[in-house]
Image (cartoon, rainbow, N blue to C red):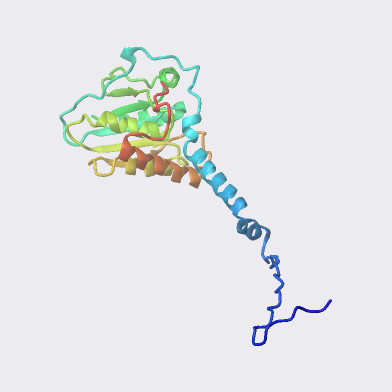
Amino acid sequence: MPEEERPPGADPEPRRQRIRRKRARPRQGTLLQRLWWNRRTRLVILALGVAAGLAWFFAPAWQRKRGSSPRPLPQAVTAVPRGSAPGPDVISVFIEDPWRSQSALLLWRERPGAYLVLQGNAEYQAITTNHLRNRQLWPRDTSRIVRLLPGCDTVGQVTHLARLLQNWPQQGRITIVTAPTHIDRTLAISRIVYAGTGWQVDGSDAETGDLRPESQLRLWRDQLRASLWRLTGWDGRLDGNDCV
């Protein structure tokens, strides 16, 4: 078929250019790197990471309340006496293990004028009292023994004691008696809670059979919860840490 004649001086007909589609070259790298380069996979990984972080932080909030714990009578909760002596001495113990209470009671006997705070729900309070009475260690004068029931975990027990001691006219020393493997995390929480309050916090090892090692992640989480409590008054538990 003859080509169409073009007028003299006209530009030659442009040739049609073929559009070449660029083929995606496979990226080299490990399996994790190739997954991360995929945008959808990256979003899924980030979402799972955020969900895991929230689950890790709010794990105490999802623990069920102890259904077998009886509700204490109003007279079972003892308020901290407002002593006028300078530098009050407070010994606190988490009484999930009665042997901790026994160690704290023996330490309390060595410090005349000190207050002993037994921290735990009504069920643990009864178990501890029977344990000490059976060993003839329960004192006749209990005017300096305080029973503090709220607090489902370490953060809750430390913060509830801090709230209770806000009514004291003067600050002094707090000694927390707990398991040797538990004391580092407890003191890390306490130093955040009592920072700037004037209270000096230290620890004392208790004789106990509960020597389970502590997790570093649990320590960081509870330090974060203690900082949140200092800022907002909430420690991360949906039940308010009132498991009594």
Residue sitting at the far right:
1
Taking the spot 38% from the left edge, 27% from the top edge, the residue there is: 119
Taking the spot 42% from the left edge, 23% from the top edge, the residue there is: 243
In-front residue for pair 237/124: 237
Split into 4 quadrants, where in the image is the N terminus?
bottom right
Q: In this view, does 2 lie to the left or right of 59?
A: right
Where 78 sits versus 22, above or below?
above
Can you tell which quarter of the image residue 28 is in?
A: bottom right
In-front residue for pair 185/176: 185
In-front residue for pair 200/227: 227
Q: In this view, does 194 lie to the left or right of 152?
A: left
Where 54 sits versus 42, above or below?
above
In-front residue for pair 83/105: 83
Q: Residue 76: horizontal and vertical position, in percent?
A: 34, 15
Split into 4 quadrants, where in the image is the C terminus?
top left
Q: Residue 69: horizontal and vertical position, in percent?
A: 46, 17
Q: Residue 226: horizontal and vertical position, in percent?
A: 37, 40
Residue 185 appears anywhere in the view: yes
**How many numbered marks appear?**
0
Can you tell which quarter of the image residue 240 is in?
A: top left
Q: Is residue 58 left or right of residue 167?
A: right
Residue 112 appears anywhere in the view: no
Q: In this view, does 131 lie to the left or right of 31?
A: left
Q: Residue 148: horizontal and vertical position, in percent?
A: 34, 24
